[in-house]
Image: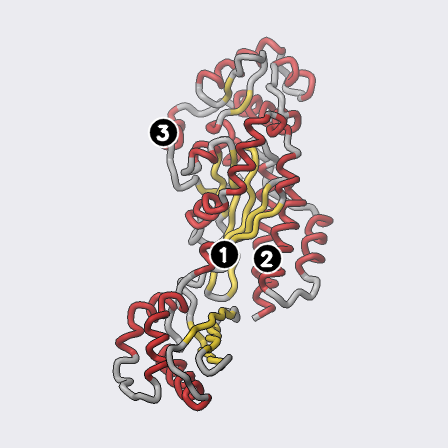
Amino acid sequence: MKSNLKFGNFEPDYVKDFAMMTEYQLKEREKAILRFVIHQFILTASPVGSRNVSKKYDVGLSPASIRNIMSDLEELGFLNHPHTSAGRVPTDKGYRVYVDSLMDPPKLDNHTKQVVDVNLGSGITETEELLKITSNILSVLTNQLAMVTYPKFEQAVLEKIQIVQLSSTRILVVVSVKSGLVRTITLEIDAEIKEEQVISIQQFLSERLSGLKFSEIRTTFQDRIKDIDNEFYRPIVRVFLDSVDKIFTDVSSEKAIISGTKNILKQPEFLDHEQFQGVIELIESKDIIIHILDKNKNLPDNDVTVTIGGENQDEKLSDYSMITKEYKIGDLQGTLGIMGPKRMDYSKVIAAVVYIAEQLTQELTKLR
């Protein structure tokens, strides 16, 4: 299978050594046994023995031969041998080879596609509501923890500014970007203002700032309005100067929708109290998850990122895998994906993440 999967941003030693593994090409028998061991472990969550592989899969080898191959795979670092069991489990390195070259090609069945299409295409007109539904669908389909970050405004292009007078000293600033999304912020003004002041400054700012990226507006705002030295404009201009970083910054970087805590806690891995407590703490530390999702953004089109165990930057994620993909709304981008135990059906989950990201992009485009 030709893969456009990407390593995580952090490269542990075994990932760096992965390129060197071409010096030792896995034999076809070794590939088959590694594949069957991982398949069986994904199904049962129990260490896999040679007799188990012999009974379950038609490999044409005796249990003794399978045992020898599994021993070789362990020496090469693809399998591990828990002390309390005669069976073996995949290592991060084993999962990586599996994901990149041994698993079935990711493919979503038509029924699942229809479920996604019906839920996402149900006439929703609010971006936030659509993102919430997306997160729920992804969690239900994968039985993992689903995550969707809000679109990133950092590279958003301003379309227009509207200013609504709420009182003699308060205004509501409505910022519209070319993707069709809107942000609002309420500002307090030190002096009383009149409606004609609001209308004039709204037109002036729209003319000076429309077509610029948020990042450009923040760094050049003062220069673009320096020729305004009119008492008529000054109260509103002053509050814009003081609040430009707040108005034209990316507050969405702190926002993400996380769904499926109940789903992930049903996994056998969390029968252990320590593991259970660990995943609860991780879910509550939303900033860690958002940070990892942000690290995986800005990939080339159609890329899906799979980070496995130690490939994740944060040590707290060393027992988990993350599968992420960008979605788009015009010139803005967000990320969706799942987090779960390393023992997951990678082919099915990757297919779900990719399809849902593509459908979300289509639905958001319709809202513009």
In this rendered view, identify the residue nearer to me: 208 or 275.
Answer: 275
Q: Is residue 231 left or right of residue 333?
A: left
In this rendered view, identify the residue nearer to me: 342 or 256.
Answer: 256
Nearer to us: label 3 or label 1 = 1
Q: Position of residue 338 (x, y in %)?
A: 56, 43
**Label 2 or label 1, whichever comes before in sequence order:** 2
Three-letter amino acid code at the position of disc 1: Gly
Three-letter amino acid code at the position of disc 2: Leu
Q: Position of residue 314 (x, y in %)?
A: 42, 37
- Mark 2 lies on a secondary structure that is helix
In the picture, the disc for residue 13 is 3
Is 331 located above or below residue 321 in the figure? Answer: below
Quarter occupied by residue 37: top right
Q: Position of residue 357 (x, y in %)?
A: 57, 54
Nearer to us: label 3 or label 2 = 2
- Mark 3 lies on a secondary structure that is helix
* Residue contact between numbered discs 2 and 1, judged by CB atoms under 8 Å: yes
In the picture, the disc for residue 131 is 2
Going 47% across and 72% down the picture, which residue do you hit?
186
Q: Position of residue 221 (x, y in %)?
A: 31, 74
Cα gap from disc 2 to disc 1, whole angstroms: 10 Å
**Label 3 or label 2, whichever comes before in sequence order:** 3
Going 53% across and 12% down the picture, which residue do you hit?
83
**Count of marks, rendered view:** 3
